[in-house]
Amino acid sequence: MSDASLWSALADPHRRAIVALLLERPRPVGEIVEACGLSQPSTSKHLKVLRDAGLVRVRQDAQRRVYALDPAPIAALDAWLDPYRRLWNRSLDALGRRLDETSDDPDRPSAKD
């Protein structure tokens, strides 16, 4: 799995919908086709991209192929996003403090004045 293939796989809204479905539980292809409203060939192409990116695993169950989400790439993506999340949290915390300071100032005119 490369970072580029992971981002590319998740860029498509149909593939994100498939990932969301698989977050609930593993599903056979037929269920994914039905839930997403795509054709079977189109769904299979999306599943191949997700599989190639390492986001899903597939197992054979008799005549059915059952797909499951692989959490490892999502965890890697979450770890990559963590510094940005901290940056946003610090910025939002600072904004919250500033808003608290201005709302407590009795000499400051309110929006109603």
Image (spheres, grey):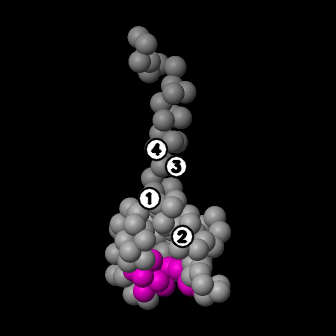
Q: Secondary structure at mark 2?
A: helix
Q: Residues within 10 Å of mark 2 (few under 14, many from 20)?
A: some
| Residue 48, placed above or below residue 17 | below
Q: Of tags 3 and 2, which is closer to the observer? A: 2
Residue at the location (47% across, 39% down)?
A: 98
Q: Residues within 10 Å of mark 4 (few under 14, many from 20)?
A: few
Q: Of tags 2 and 4, which is closer to the observer? A: 2
Are discs 3 and 4 less than 8 Å apart at CB?
yes
Furthest-front residue in view?
Answer: 63
Label ID, residue 37: 1
Looking at the rendering, the stretch of residues picked out in magenta corresponds to 46-59
For the residue marked with disc 4, what is the amino acid? Leu
For the residue marked with disc 1, what is the amino acid? Gly
Cα separation between marks 3 and 4? 5 Å
For the residue marked with disc 2, what is the amino acid? Gly
Label ID, residue 95: 4
Task: Find disc 3 in the rendering and name its residue.
Answer: 93
Res. 46 visible in picture:
no
Q: Earlier in the sequence, mark 1 or mark 3?
A: 1
Task: Find disc 2 in the rendering and name its residue.
Answer: 30
Are discs 1 and 3 less than 8 Å apart at CB?
no
Q: Earlier in the sequence, mark 1 or mark 4?
A: 1
For the residue marked with disc 3, what is the amino acid? Asp
